[in-house]
Amino acid sequence: MLRYHLGWIDQQGQPRSDSASLNFQPALALAACDALGGDFRNALPSAASVELIYNFTLVHSDVQAGRAEPGDRPSIWWVWGPAQAINAGDGLHSLGRTTIMRLAKNGVPADRVLKAVKSLDQACLTLCEGQYMDLEFQDQMMVSTAAYMDMIGRKAGALASCAALTGALTAGSSDEVCDSFGALGRNMGMAWQIARDIDDLWGKHGDGMTPSNVLNKKKSLPLIHTLENSSVSVKRELGAIYMKRVLEANDIAKMVEILDGADARQASQTKAQELVDQAIDGLTGVSGVSQEGMDNLASLGQWAAEGGR
């Protein structure tokens, strides 16, 4: 089940030729280590760990949202049932935690390995808090931008922060530098989540043809922006859609039309870019960061702002 979820095999256990691509979070761990003069290969356990933890969240969120086919294949719970999916998600969490301990095999001192493990555990707790908030928002019509930003700072920012911080730890950087990279990761993770929200509504090609979380009444930034900045009549129109017990595909099309009228997509993209700019600006004056490393991190930030996967 784990190999299937990671895209390595199909339902019959046969190897897949189109293996899964790299996600944003593990790439950030490697780039952070490299930017600080470390050998990025030493940070591979951190990268693998955050990838496994990220997939743990995906398996569980598929069960929570009832998503039968979140991407290019049916979800674990759809194939093997929700009980086995929960078990598989727990297994990915355990693998993520044991994997980060392999930093010790790459010459990382024991005290730094312990800090990396602590960072990962804290990130897991924080992202669960963010997931709790995200689920709570589904039952609320009005959610503020500030509340949304707090939620994605936990749900998406925590793991990206851990990735960047552990990459810096692996490079042997000071606590202050590690904290700066943690802040960079949090901002980039938030930008990445906003980009995912945009994709969920409009699709990679702008046609809205995606397996949408909107059917579960998730509150994303484009919707929140529209509710906060539109006329009373527009708010009522959106409210009428969201008051339905079950949303249908044509409701989503109407919602996207309303959001387009409020320029919600551009406003959300602008916010994602602001977060990436803040992330890079936050490294100004941080010692040990090469110019090439800074450029690579900036490029990675742009990738995050485009959905990073």
Image (spheres, rainbow, N blue to C red):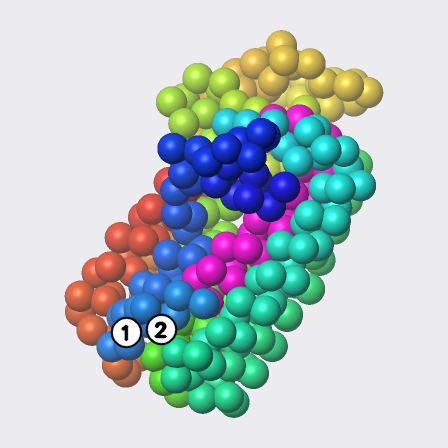
**Mark 2 is on which residue type?**
Asn
Calculate the distance from the C-alpha at mark 2 to the C-alpha at mark 1: 6 Å
Residue 113 falls left or right of residue 302:
right
Query: Does residue 210 lie above or below 105 as drawn?
Result: above
User: What is the x, y in percent for residue 157?
Assistant: 53, 58
**In the rendered structure, which segment of residues is drawn in magenta?**
46-71
Question: Mark number for residue 234?
Answer: none
User: What is the x, y in percent for residue 33?
Assistant: 33, 71
Label 2 close to label 1 by CB (< 8 Å) = yes
Question: Mark number for residue 42?
Answer: 2
Query: Could you say which quadrant of the image residue 91 lies in?
Result: bottom right
Question: Residue at 25% of width from left, 77% of height from top?
Answer: 37
Observer-nearest of 162 and 76? 76
User: What is the x, y in percent for residue 68?
Assistant: 66, 26
User: What is the x, y in percent for residue 61?
Assistant: 68, 42
To which residue does mark 1 refer?
39
Q: Secondary structure at mark 2?
A: helix
Observer-nearest of 88 and 30? 88
Main secondary structure of the magenta stretch? helix
- Badge 1: residue crowd in 10 Å (few <14, some 14–19, many ≥20): some
Question: Residue at 57% of width from left, 24% of height from top?
Answer: 211
